[in-house]
Amino acid sequence: MEYEPTAVGVAIVALFGLLVGSFLNVVIVRRGHDDWEQRTGLNGRSACPKCGHEISWWENIPVLSWLALRGRCRGCRNPISWRYPLVELLTAGLWGAVGATAHGVPELVTGVVLLSVLVPVTFIDLQLQIIPDEVNYAAIWLGFACSLGFGPQDRFAAGAQWWWLEVLLASFGAAAFLLLPTLITRGRGMGAGDVKLVVALGAFLGAPVAVGLMAGFLVALVPSIVLIVVRGVAAGRKSKIPFGPFLAIGGAVGWFVGPQALDAYLRLGS
Ligand SMILES: [Zn+2]
C-alpha cells in the first residue's frame, strides 16, 4: 500500500492523533489514578469525581472543550488537569511528525503505534513511578506484530534477508543491555518495567534501538546532574527519577533519526 506525505495527508494523520490522544487520556486516567475523573469503562459515561457532574459529548472534544471550559468542571468549577489537552496535542504532534516522514503504510502504522504507546508510558511513570504490565505487554505484542507482520522495512539495518532476526536480536539485546544496570542498582534507578519497555522498543525499531537507548541515557543524565548539583551527591543518589519517560524520549529519537544515525556510525567504523 502506498503512503507518501502530503499536506492533506499529514493533517488527517494529526487529526486522528488528536482522537487517539483523547483515548490515551482514558488509559492514563484508568491506570494512573487521576483525581479529577473516573470512568466506569471505555464506553462508560465520564463524571467529575468531586461533584458527580456527567460529562456530555461537547465537554469531551479534544483540546477545544478544555479551552471552552477554561480548564474547570462545569458543575463545581474545580480545575481539570492541563494534562488532558497536553496529551491530546502531544499525540497529534507525534502523529503529524510520523505522517510527515513516513513512506509507505507499514512505516506510517508502525510509527504512530509506537509513539502512541510511549505517551501513556511517560505520563503513568511520571505519576506512579511504574510502567503497568498491561501497557508493556501490549507494547511488546504491538511491536512484534508491526515489525514482523509488515515484513522488511526501510528502517531495519540488516539486509532484507535477515530483517526478522534483527528484530528479535534488537529486542532481546536491548533487554540484556538494560538488565545489567537494573541488577546493579537493584531496581532503584531502573526496574523490571523499564526492561520490558526496552523489549518493546527493540521490537518496533530493530537495530536502531541502540540509538534510542543511547539517546534515552543521555537525556536522563540531565535531571540526575541537576539534582546532584542542587542537592549534593548523597541526595542525588537517593532520589528516584522514573526512567520510563527517558526511554520513551529515546524511543521517539530512535524512530525519527535512528536508522540514519546508525548508518552514519557504521560508516565511520569502516
Ligand atoms: Zn465537578
Image: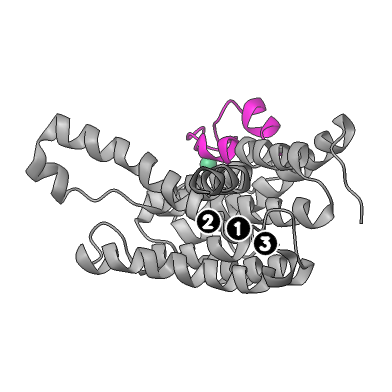
Q: Amino acid at mark 3?
A: Gly
Q: Is 83 included in the stretch rendered in magenta?
A: yes
Vertical relation: 242 (above or below) 66:
below
- Residue at horizontal 49 percent and vertical 61 percent from the top: 31
Q: Quadrant of residue 9?
A: top right
Pointer 1 residue: 205
Q: Which residues are magenta?
A: 62-87
Q: Is residue 49 visible?
A: no
User: Do tag 2 and tag 1 residues touch (Cβ < 8 Å)?
Assistant: yes
Mark 1 crowd level (few <14, some 14–19, many ≥20, 10 Å Cα): many
Front residue of 54 and 86:
86
Residue 225 image offset from top left, x and y in percent: 23, 36
Residue labelled 3 has its Cβ within 8 Å of some atom of ligand 1:
no
Q: Secondary structure at mark 1?
A: helix
Q: Nearer the viewer, mark 3 or mark 1?
A: 1
Spot the residue most to the right. Answer: 1
Q: Residues within 10 Å of mark 2 (few under 14, many from 20)?
A: many
Per the model, the C-alpha gap separating discs 2 and 3 is: 38 Å
| x 33%, y 51%: residue | 242
Q: Which residue is mark 2?
A: 209
Classified by dominant secondary structure, the portion drawn in magenta counts as loop
In the depicted structure, whether residue 228 falls above or below residue 123: above
Which comes sooner in the sequence, label 3 or label 1?
Answer: 3
* CA separation in Å, label 2 and label 1: 5 Å
x 64%, y 49%: residue:
54
Residue at mark 3: 44
Q: Is mark 1 within 8 Å of ligand 1?
A: no
Q: Say which of marks 2 and 3 sits in front.
A: 2
The reply, left or right, for residue 266 in relation to residue 56 is left
- Looking at the rendered structure, the secondary structure element under dot 3 is loop
Q: Which mark is residue 180?
A: none
